[in-house]
Amino acid sequence: MTFGSTAKILRVNLSTSVLEVETLSEDFYRLYPGGKALAGYILLNELPAHTEPFAPENVLVIANGLLTGAPVSTATRYVVSARSPLTGGYGESEAGGFWGPELKMAGFEAIIIKGRAPQPVYLWIQDGVAEIRPAEHLWGRTTAEAQQAIRADLGDEKIRVLQIGIAGENLVRYAGLTNDLRHFNGRTGMGAVMGSKNLRAIAVRGSQRYQSLAHDPETLLTLGRKLSKSMREHPASWDLQVRGTPGLVEPLNAGGILPTRNFRQGAFEGVDEVKWEAYEQQLLTARRSCYACAIRCKREVNVNGQPSPYGGPEYETLGAFGPNCGISDLQAIAKANELCNAYVLDSISAGVTIAFAMECFEHGLIGLNDTGGIDLRFGNAEAMLTILEQIARREGLGDLLAEGSKRAAEKIGGDAHFFAIQVKGQELAMHEPRGKYNVGMGYAISEIGADHLVVAHDPAFANPEAIQFKSAAPLGITVAQPPRLLNAEKMKHFYILERWGSMEKTTGYCFFGPAPRSFIHPDDVLLSLNAATGWNLTLDDLLQIGERGTNLARIFNLREGFTRQDDTLPERIFQGLENGPLQGLGLPREEFEQALTLLYTLKGWDPQTGVPGRERLESLSLGWAADMLPVQTRN
Amino acid sequence: MKLYAGGQLDFYLLQHRSWVELELKEPTRLSALLVELGIPLAEVHLVVLNGQLVDLQEVFVCGQDEVKLYPAVNGG
């Protein structure tokens, strides 16, 4: 028996309507214990290279982490993976909420979806039994309407619904998935892949308890209780409890690292209108949590004075539709968040792509004829909302912007490519890399394109006496470094933190759970996983689990033709910011390239090409994957 | 003077208040004041005095000064 896991995968072929259940061996699951690592293994082995993202042959993997559903705060996450229609590379997006735990309670660790249904369908899973059901009546509906209809169809208000919206139906390349209308797999266009399969939703209901799967349920429960208590007494999780991610707006602005007007600036003159105090006064109605999580960082809101059926805007959404579009109208930003949730668009890519269009408009690269008469300047909230609607529906200029900023820039031509703030085709998140160099390195090297959750952010490691810094010592981070520096020690930080983050994405932990980002000591992370599995893992084992996941994704991308030249940053980031405390400062290109070489070396990759070496792959039990590298890249 | 403890820094203040008003009779070293208030200096990443970023170790405050403190914030 595999403890900590149901060891079951549901395989769904939508072309043939065949459903099969596969049982995983413990030896296999120990190497690929869910989430990122499991998805990476499946994609490399079952998805032929160069498969078109919207072809029926693309493989959509939805995978819980090992610990997802355990009675431990922040262990709620699942990943959704496929070849990304936004980047053409490895697609991946994580979310929390209640759906992942419910899937485990219903008996499955993962779902592998292939083929394309002839008509819209949804999948219904209850306690080990799955069924494909018609969904024509859901197509074109908002997520709130569709969730209500599914629950009514099945006669159970407690069913958890994971679904796409009309953006996914319309193949917007950065369409996502949502569960419970307020938890999102936003990034890399996984909703568009699901839409291309004519799969609108996956409804689940389960009655199993995680404790029945655990090797040592008593230790797990005791640890869960201890963490819930310690979380309330820990400063690193305090701000998440009180403000949630919207609390980031003001401190980032003070440091000059709040992306503003398409990353031209780092400070926003309208910050007081969009910071937490304004949010609390104008929008906030309640605080909510994910499954079994004591932090309660989710927010419920009113929009234009009316209760919203969707969750409140997170920091990323506030930043992307607010300062980055030059907009300080908080109600308009909240409305944009509601539209993204109702239609399921990645709010980061949507906001940054609209900011891109605003800059193109201000430079005359697109005009009123292109926008249908919309004055698409920075700061025009009404224009932002209109374009957002158009993107979801692929109408007017929205049809072009639905392709993402990189493809749109290629179509517009001229200097438009300079205004596309993206890596590998995916837009940067709301964290300014010119003030946090390892965040920049994360944007550059991430296999999914610009991703802000590759490593815990640099400022946490600047002061050797700070709580977050000290909590990273068990992982091997012992020498503090300034945020605006790239050197060998910083690359050591990166290499450790990247593996730790990848481990979180594999085991189901949220970025807001484990140290150094938050309050769960690495020893308690270890204890939770060992109590679940009985595997007697060490911290080194956990780092190796993480490293396995990043290497699988790297090989996936190399197989698709990615090279070192793709591990870079937008040209703008190498230039100086226009305002704020970091005015005039850019990320030094030469230092960046040298650091990238150092990092490749630490990772056991060829220092020049970034191709994983066979020796390192074999040490990770990934010798088989070395044979999947393109012949010309093998070393 | 008025002092704002941003981010998780209000965790350390009495009743977790974000704003504190203090009467200072003479210019006072900010770092000493924060120690008195129970805010660990290592947790203070940025100090904004009357709208300008300043160095925590060097700054003195008094009278009508407004000080905003921010911790090192992470992603999410």
Image (tube, coloured by chain):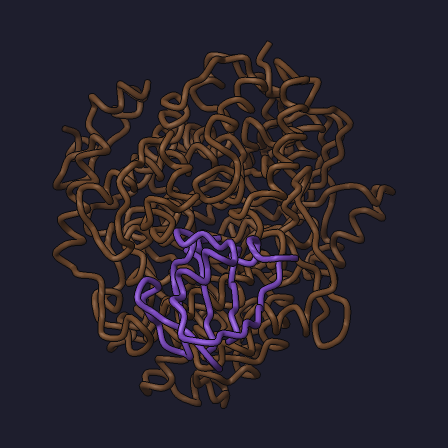
Residue A203 percent coordinates (x, y): 72, 41
Q: Would you say A84 lies left or right of A628 here? A: right
What is the residue that sits farthest to the right in this orientation?
A155
Residue A43 percent coordinates (x, y): 42, 33
Q: Nearer the viewer, residue A118 or A287?
A: A287
Residue A97 occupies quadrant: top right
Residue A559 percent coordinates (x, y): 28, 37
What is the residue that sits farthest to the top in this orientation?
A1
Residue A122 occupies quadrant: top right
Quadrant of the rendering where the N terminus of chain A is positioned? top right
Residue A566, relative to residue A309: is it above or below? above
Chain drawn in brown? A
Q: Which residue lies at the image location 29% right of the left edge and 75% below the top edge?
A: A416
Q: Which residue lies at the image location 75% right of the left edge and 30% below the top edge?
A: A206
Residue A430 occupies quadrant: bottom left
Q: Nearer the viewer, residue A328 or A22?
A: A328
Residue A429, relative to residue A292: is it above or below? below
Q: Which residue lies at the image location 29% right of the left edge and 40% below the top edge?
A: A493
Please identify which colour was used for chain B in the image: purple
Q: Would you say A325 lies left or right of A107 here? A: left
Q: Nearer the viewer, residue A107 or A561?
A: A107
Residue A414 in sight in this render: yes
Residue A114 in sight in this render: no
Quadrant of the rendering where the C terminus of chain A is positioned? top left
Number of numbered markers: 0
Residue A213 percent coordinates (x, y): 66, 18
What is the residue that sits farthest to the front in this orientation?
B25
Q: Nearer the viewer, residue A235 or A564?
A: A235
